[in-house]
Image (cartoon, rainbow, N blue to C red):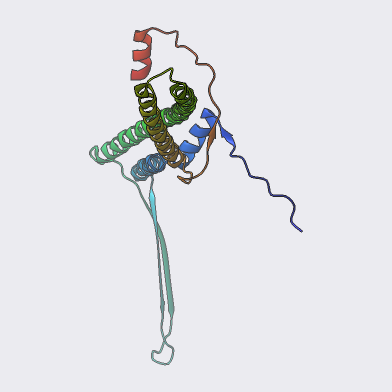
Amino acid sequence: MLGPVYASQPAQLTIADSVRLAITHSPALKAAKAETEKASWLVKENHSAYLPTLSVNHLQAYNDPDTITYPSNYRSSSLEAKTILYSGGLTEGLVGQAKELYTGAQHSFAYTKQQVITNTYLAYYNVLQAEKNVALADEAVQRLTQHLSIVQAQYSEGTVIKSDVLRTEVELAQAKQNHSKAKNTSRLASSQFATLLGLPADQDIALADVSETVAYNGSIAQAIQTALT
């Protein structure tokens, strides 16, 4: 006999959790990492030209005693090492070029990572804002629904005119439309956020709201210099 089934509640994601998931599952970041590793191996490949190369040769001959008077066996082995003493700057140029490509790939990886983090922050707060907009729209619908009941009662008593009822009905219809738009916007924001984190687009996600924001105390010049760095 099965026990009672409880509905599982989605775990709350903090901004740190979200950034970690986005970095882990980002296709762009994985591609940038692969390019960095590729450039690193290119540096090693070009640098290997400075290393000596070894070659081994072995020769063995055997004479059939049934066909010659004096059969004999012959064996010869040789080991050869070669190294480049001077390449006219070609090896140095290839190594330098590979290092520049590797440095560029590292910068590209760092930039892509920062973009993923930035996009995650934006998507996270878009979801929070969209959820708050839904709550505000829902509150407006409830408030106007109660107000319509009051106005209809007053109209029945003759204390207000018909236009007051009609105006409230129009406002309520507009509030319901705004509520529907807010819910659609919230679903879209949640879907985009889940995709960014590498989660199914229809997965329920609960976000840990951020109650306070730390103000930046630096100057504009310091902020610009940090961004350039």
Q: Quadrant of residue 140?
A: top left
In front here: 116 or 1?
A: 1
Which residue is located at x 42 percent, y 86 percent? 70
In front here: 5 or 87?
A: 5
Q: Work out which quarter of the rendered image holds the C terminus and state it.
A: top left
Q: Quadrant of residue 42?
A: top left
Measuring from the top left, give residue 224's x and y in whole percent: 34, 14
Q: Quadrant of residue 76?
A: bottom left
In front here: 48 or 121?
A: 121
Measuring from the top left, give residue 118's x and y in whole percent: 40, 28
Q: Is residue 108 visible?
A: yes
Which residue is farthest left? 88
In front here: 23 or 106?
A: 23
Which residue is located at x 55 percent, y 29 percent? 14
Which residue is farthest right? 1
Measuring from the top left, give residue 156's x and y in whole percent: 46, 25
Q: Work out which quarter of the rendered image holds the N terminus and state it.
A: bottom right
Measuring from the top left, give residue 214's x and y in whole percent: 50, 14
Which residue is located at x 58 percent, y 33 percent? 12
Q: Is residue 229 visible?
A: no
Which residue is farthest front? 158
- Count of numbered marks: 0
- Is 229 above or below relative to 80? above
Q: Is residue 11 left or right of residue 165?
A: right
